[in-house]
Every structure is written in C-alpha cells, then in structure tokens.
Image (tube, rainbow, N blue to C red):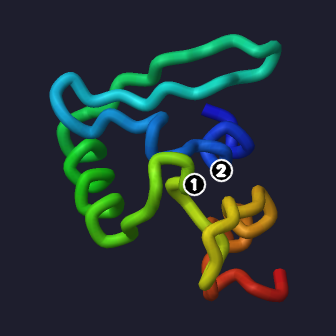
Amino acid sequence: MRVSELTSLTRTDTRPDTPAYIACHSKGRKDRITPLDAGTAAALRVWLRENPGTPTTPVFTARGTDRKMTTDAVAQRLKGPHRQGC
C-alpha cells in the first residue's frame, strides 16, 4: 500500500473483524482489498476504539484535527526522534 493510499483511508475503508481487510482506492482508480493478519487487525480495532470518529473520518489524522495525516507527517514519524537533523 502506498503512503498516499494509507493516509487517505477512512473508517469505512476498514474491516478489522474477521475476515479483516482494508479497502483502498489505488493509483489508476483501481480498488484494492488488502487482507490484514490477526495482529494488525487487533491493533486496528484498538486504534479505532481509542480514536473515534464518523465513517468519513480519516483513520490517521493530523495532530489535534480531523484532517488526514500528510505523507510528510508519516515520513517524519517513521524517521523518529533519534534521526532528526540527519
């Protein structure tokens, strides 16, 4: 899954129950179903419970807002605090 597809996911795109999967709209207007393993599905259920929203709310939001997280924000979080300034 591309980062842009991940940041565009809404709560309605997620199916964390059995069979667990994510439905995304990928490049070229193609719809794709990505199955989730049990651990990822469990983590997603917890995340959605701890971060409530409407069906159209992005799964991953910018801090303190209901707007979707940007791809730059994802890159920054993956970079982590130990690598800032590199």
| Between discs 1 and 2, the one toward the N terminus | 2
Is label 1 in contact with label 2 (beta carbons under 8 Å)?
yes
Name the residue that disc number 1 marks.
58
In the depicted structure, whether residue 56 falls above or below residue 14: below
In the depicted structure, whether residue 83 falls above or below residue 18: below
Q: Secondary structure at mark 1?
A: loop
For this view, does 21 lie left or right of residue 31? left
- Kindly identify the residue that appears in the image at 39 percent across and 69 percent down: 51
Q: Position of residue 36 (x, y in %)?
A: 32, 32
In the depicted structure, whether residue 7 falls above or below residue 82: above
How far apart are the two marked residues, 1 and 2, measured between alpha carbons? 7 Å
- Kindly identify the residue that appears in the image at 24 percent across and 61 percent down: 46
Name the residue that disc number 2 marks.
7
For this view, does 53 lie left or right of residue 80? left
Q: Secondary structure at mark 2?
A: helix
In the depicted structure, whether residue 64 falls above or below residue 55: below
Q: Position of residue 3 (x, y in %)?
A: 69, 45
Q: Nearer the viewer, residue 52 or 77?
A: 52
Q: Position of residue 38 (x, y in %)?
A: 18, 38
For this view, does 54 lie left or right of residue 80? left
